[in-house]
Image: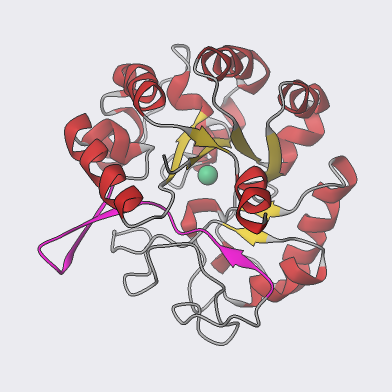
């Protein structure tokens, strides 16, 4: 049975693109919503990678400890969840170093809003310089906010010159988010978050099975705030409201169904097992 990879993107609901202008009026829920998530994972014997926003990790260092104590992995998800296209290479390097002061063993990164593309590919070299081993930011599809449609759909070593090309000499491993390829050209994003809430579970499960049949892990993600009944309600505009709150009450049950049917591990364990 092929193992899949589960990631929890640890941020507040106000870190998103549609909600960030409200951030000064809101409170942090992460220390409260992580323990129930750890319990669900334990019940299903699943291991996950938690990509944490730096400012949360700095404010609540106990969050890192509770995640590590349960045998999960802690990785980096930007300092205040700025998409990469808003940062300079110098700012990004500073962010990475600040996070590594909090958790020196960090080897993985996920770009906020999946903002890694050929304009922001300079990030990969910095990650390598700073001791990272993998990245999981490429979404090989098209959406209004993000997507690198032509990128490979399986783990690969990306070329530092063109991230949609493979280059075995690149030391960083890229883990693209799960998409379900239909009718040759359609690539349905099924990796989780909004897509998990939007699509029928049957479609998502067929997509995961197809990826597994090809011998690859499906890379799945969910936000901690999507699994929290007390996530603050923000006026995020029509589009934002749909993206943030659509089917929010179904996220936990849908995740539990995936955890019951498929086996999940975290990135570092997957890499270790693959190298055996
Ligand atoms: Zn995020």
Residue 28 seen: no
Q: Nearer the viewer, residue 101 or 210?
A: 210
Q: Is residue 132 visible?
A: yes
Q: Is residue 136 magenta?
A: no
Q: Quadrant of the N terminus?
A: top left
Q: Estimate the x, y position of residue 268 in percent, counting from the top left.
A: 67, 47
Decide if residue 226 is on the left or right side of residue 182.
right
Residue 234 image point, x, y percent:
41, 27
Display coloring: secondary structure
Q: Residue at x 32, y 16 (%)?
A: 249
Is the residue 88 above or below the residue 199 in the image?
below
**Which quadrant would the C terminus be assigned to in this image?**
bottom right
Give me the residue at 39% from left, 70% from top: 152
Query: Vertically, is 156 above or below 163?
Result: above
Residue 212 coordinates in the image, percent (x, y): 35, 48
Task: Report which quarter residue 123 is drawn in.
Answer: bottom right
Residue drawn 34% across the image and 16% down it: 253
What are the residue bounds of the magenta stretch? 171-189
Please identify the residue farthest to the bottom as the structure is shown. Answer: 161
- Residue farthest along the left direction in this orientation: 183
Task: Answer left or right for 199 relative to 33.
Answer: left
- Disc tally is 0
Position of residue 99 measured from the top left corner of the image (x, y, whole percent): 80, 48
Q: Is residue 124 above or below residue 212?
A: below
Q: Which residue is located at x 59 percent, y 80 percent?
A: 168
Residue 187 lies in the magenta stretch = yes
């Amino acid at each position: 049975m092929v193992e899949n990879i589960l990631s929890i993107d640890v941020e507040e609901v106000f870190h998103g693109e549609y909600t960030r202008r409200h951030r000064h009026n809101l409170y942090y829920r992460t220390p409260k919503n992580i323990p129930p998530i750890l319990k669900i994972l334990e019940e299903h014997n699943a291991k996950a990678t938690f990509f944490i926003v730096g400012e949360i990790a700095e404010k609540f260092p106990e969050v890192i400890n509770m995640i590590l104590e349960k045998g999960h992995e802690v990785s980096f998800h930007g300092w205040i969840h700025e998409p990469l296209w808003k940062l300079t290479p110098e700012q990004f390097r500073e962010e990475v170093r600040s996070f590594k002061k909090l958790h020196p063993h960090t080897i993985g990164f996920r770009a906020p809003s999946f903002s890694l593309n050929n304009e922001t590919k300079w990030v990969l070299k910095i990650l390598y310089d700073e001791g990272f081993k993998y990245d999981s930011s490429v979404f090989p599809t098209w959406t209004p906010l993000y997507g690198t449609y032509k990128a490979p759909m399986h783990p690969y070593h990306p070329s530092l010159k063109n991230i949609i090309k493979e280059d075995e000499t690149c030391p960083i491993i890229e883990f693209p988010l799960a998409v379900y390829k239909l009718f040759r050209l359609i690539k349905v994003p099924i990796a989780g978050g909004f897509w998990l809430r939007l699509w029928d579970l049957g479609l998502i499960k067929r997509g995961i099975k197809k990826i597994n049949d090809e011998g690859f892990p499906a890379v799945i993600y969910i936000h901690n705030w999507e699994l929290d009944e007390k996530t603050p309600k923000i006026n995020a505009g029509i589009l934002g409201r749909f993206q943030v709150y659509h089917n929010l009450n179904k996220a936990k049950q849908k995740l539990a169904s995936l955890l019951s049917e498929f086996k999940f591990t975290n990135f570092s364990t997957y890499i270790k097992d693959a190298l055996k």
